[in-house]
Image (spheres, helix red, strand yellow):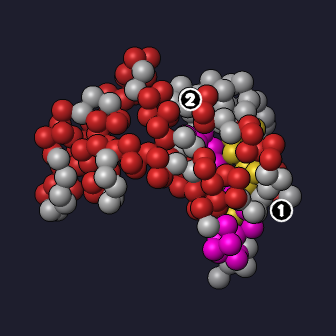
Amino acid sequence: NYKKIALCGFSLGGNVTLKYMGENPDGVNEKIIGAVGISVPVDLPSGSQRISRWDNKPYVSRFFKTLKEKAHIKKQQGFDFNYEGVLKARTFLDFDHAFTGPVHGYKSGMDYYIRASSKPGLKNINRPTLLINAQNDPFLSKKCFPFEAARNNPEFYLLAPKEGGHVGFPGENTAGFYWSEEKTYAFLENL
């Protein structure tokens, strides 16, 4: 039974973490002392557009294969969604219109993006929370760098190094840790 908990989420899991911290700050579990998000698309509509660009096509094609396999399993389990739309999907928005939105109670993929984005709640975070997004992350748009929220909320911190890619952040150190791991550890250690 832990007395203190720190949350850490990566990519879409980081969006969920930050949304939890900011959506109902007074309802956050009292044991949670802080959180860290790494490579987080805090603005899902623009992140979806960015990831669907031609230069991300190899990643998207590979990822779609696994997404479509998972959707097939959900179809066999009786979930109600537009399976034909899933098979025809060429962008994340197409896929999320056909699958993610309906399966999770949203009207559409765009409704999911708008309502599930963590960015609007960053201003409400009331416990130390760090976001680490690399400026060269191929999946993040400019809207995924909430500098204003970091300036205006003393509990929300943003690190935006020039390099690091998507959940990459390699760095040279003898301990074998990634740069983002070192920053996360140092941030949480100070809580």
Residue located at (70% from left, 58% from top):
124
Residue linked to disc 1: 191
Helix, strand or loop under label 1? loop
> Horizontal and vertical percent for residue 174?
78, 36
Say which mark, if any, is on residue 176: none
> Horizontal and vertical percent for residue 133?
66, 36
Residue located at (40% from left, 17% from top):
54
> Horizontal and vertical percent for residue 183?
77, 44
Helix, strand or loop under label 2? loop
Q: Please tell me which of labels 2 and 1 falls first in the chain.
A: 2
Marks 2 and 1, how far apart in space? 30 Å
Residue linked to disc 2: 141
The amino acid marked with disc number 1 is Leu
Quadrant of the rendered image containing residue 23:
bottom right
Which quarter of the rendering shows the C terminus? bottom right
The amino acid marked with disc number 2 is Ser
Residue located at (74% from left, 37% from top):
147
| Range covered by the magenta-colored residues | 25-41
Residue located at (53% from left, 25% from top):
138
Q: Does the magenta-highlighted stretch encompass residue 71?
A: no
Which quarter of the rendering shows the N terminus? bottom right
Q: Answer whether residue 165 is visible to the viewer in this image.
A: no
Q: Does the magenta-highlighted stretch encompass residue 31?
A: yes
Where 8 falls versus 159 (above or below)?
A: below
Where 41 falls versus 3 (above or below)?
A: above
Where 62 falls versus 149 (above or below)?
A: above
Where 135 falls versus 121 (above or below)?
A: above
